[in-house]
Amino acid sequence: MKISLKYKLLVIIVFLFLILIFCSTLITYFYTARHQENFFVNKLSKKQASYQKKNELIKNVFSELSEEMRNLYKRNIENDFREFYFSLENSLIIESLQAQTEALAQLANKYKTENFAILEEKGIIQIANDINLWNKPILSFLETKNIKLNENLKDFVCSEYENYFVITAKLKVKNRKFNIYFFVNIQELLNFTEPQKNKILENIKDEEIADFAELTADKNEIKKIGFQLLKIFTLTNLIIFILGAIIISIALKLMLTKLAKIQSAIKEIKNKNYGYRVKLHSYLKDEFDDFAEQTNLMAEHIENEKLNELIEVTEKLLPQRREIIFSDYSVSGYIQQSREIGGDFYDLIEITENKYICVIADVVGKSFPAAYLMTLAINSIRLLCKQYDNNTSFLSALNDYIKNYTPSGKWFTMIFSVIDLLDNKIEIINCGHPSAFFYKTNNTIEISSQLPMIGQFSSEKFNKYLAEYSQNQCIHNFEKNNILIIYTDGLSDLVQNNNCNIKTLFHEFCDNNDFKKNADNFLNFIKTKLHNFDIKDDLTFCIITRH
């Protein structure tokens, strides 16, 4: 699946937009919470003012009602007193003292609060509804009740003092002068009006408290709902933020990784490593994958151009004939590369008319780097082998040259065979290469590796191996009908993949006298013996025969 880079950038923009929404939501929440707080404070203040106004109104109404009731109460006292006065007047004439006392008690009992009905003569209380007041001075009573009577009291007019309503009248009976007093405690009137007023005020107060409690509950509930919504929204946004951060991190990492690989490829191509390829292995394709593909195509195009140039060079460097005959010897070779150009080569070099060198090698790597190293190896072998008569000196110089003039990790395996036509001897030196096989009558000798690969180790270490080899050189008499086969790992891998043994195959080939012992016939022979001739690597071998 291919996702354009612009869509990845769109994901990043959407993620940033979600962060902006999250921040704006937080700001809106705190602004709303503050606005709600101010709203409830103002509403509570208005409620308080409303209830305060109600209280004042109730108090004013009750004040007016109290005044009217006070006047009505006073008139009622005056009427009761008049009625009592006239009944008393008649009782004094025709009734006894007991009847008079009962009349006073009857007047006093009309009122529930403290009251006093007094008949006074010459400053002494004659009769009262309270028997304890009889025969006591009226002034003493007034002092006890903290009442200072006004001298200008009018008869049958109710006057108001601090704690009492007072009404008086004068009575003359049989030449006797009496003063009649009726004291009624104001508390009765208050006991009637104040509870009503207080009850209404209490109801208003209860209503006020209930309203305040309801407003407070509403405020707390709105706060709670808002906080819950904020928690849910915050958690949701946090999850989105984390997932978005993970996705963006992965996307950025993938993009930066792809970019780094492309940059590495460009550097490798700049350093002339034209075989380098960008490998992204991404499931989600984007412009970076297209760029990587174009980079690979560019590298492949450059590599092919360079390879074509190298092919022309290497074709000229490799032996032009499939079989070379000198004296009673023949050297035949076969090379098939898995790509247009590989790292295998063989060569036959004439040192003198009596000395020939046959070499086969396999350089590390493939494609252009391998071709470059192969070209360098062929030329260096051809030049150096003619400069040194001693084989060990030649190998030491070759190792130093490859080690010093190639990048780190570049080396090649090699079998170096020196044929002496005068003595009919052959020296076989194996430098980390697959084993060579030397066929003598009814016997095949295996020559395995004696030295490290060329260019693998430093001069000092390689020379130690050379010193050991000098003590035990591999030199054989090259008699008639003796055959030497040298090959690269492409042949050994092919034979092993068919569950066969290369030594057995070679020995069988040499024992068969039905065909000439050369590379073409050996190739045809192994084709008949192997059921699967699928070549996956460069296939190179060389056969040296003395007839």
Image: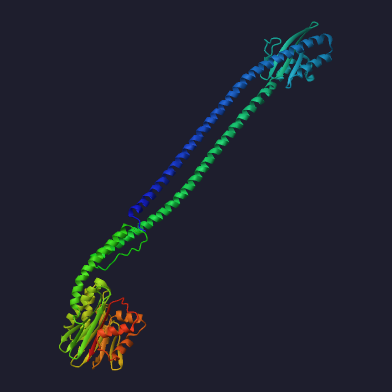
Q: Quadrant of the C terminus?
A: bottom left
Quarter location, residue 281:
bottom left
| Front-lying residue, 517 or 119 | 517
| Front-lying residue, 465 or 192 | 465
Is 248 situated left or right of 292 in this image?
A: right
- Count the marks: 0
Rendering coords of residue 381 (x, y %): 20, 80
Q: Quadrant of the N terminus?
A: bottom left
| Front-lying residue, 374 or 331 | 331
Is 313 situated left or right of 13 in this image?
A: left
- Taking the view exactly as shown, the residue that stands out farthest to the left is 353
Rendering coords of residue 89 (x, y %): 79, 9
Residue 344 versus residue 298 in the image, above or below: below
Residue 472 versus residue 164 in the image, above or below: below
User: Do we see residue 471 in this rendering?
Assistant: no
Rendering coords of residue 338 (x, y %): 28, 75
- Taking the view exactly as shown, the residue that stands out farthest to the top is 175
Query: Looking at the image, which residue is at 46% across and 39% down?
Result: 32
Query: Looking at the image, which residue is at 65% across and 28% down?
Result: 199
Residue 268 versus residue 187 in the image, above or below: below
| Front-lying residue, 390 or 57 | 390
Question: How is this picture coloured?
Answer: rainbow
Rendering coords of residue 389 (x, y %): 17, 86
User: Do we see residue 43 in this rendering?
Assistant: yes
Is 355 situated left or right of 242 in this image?
A: left
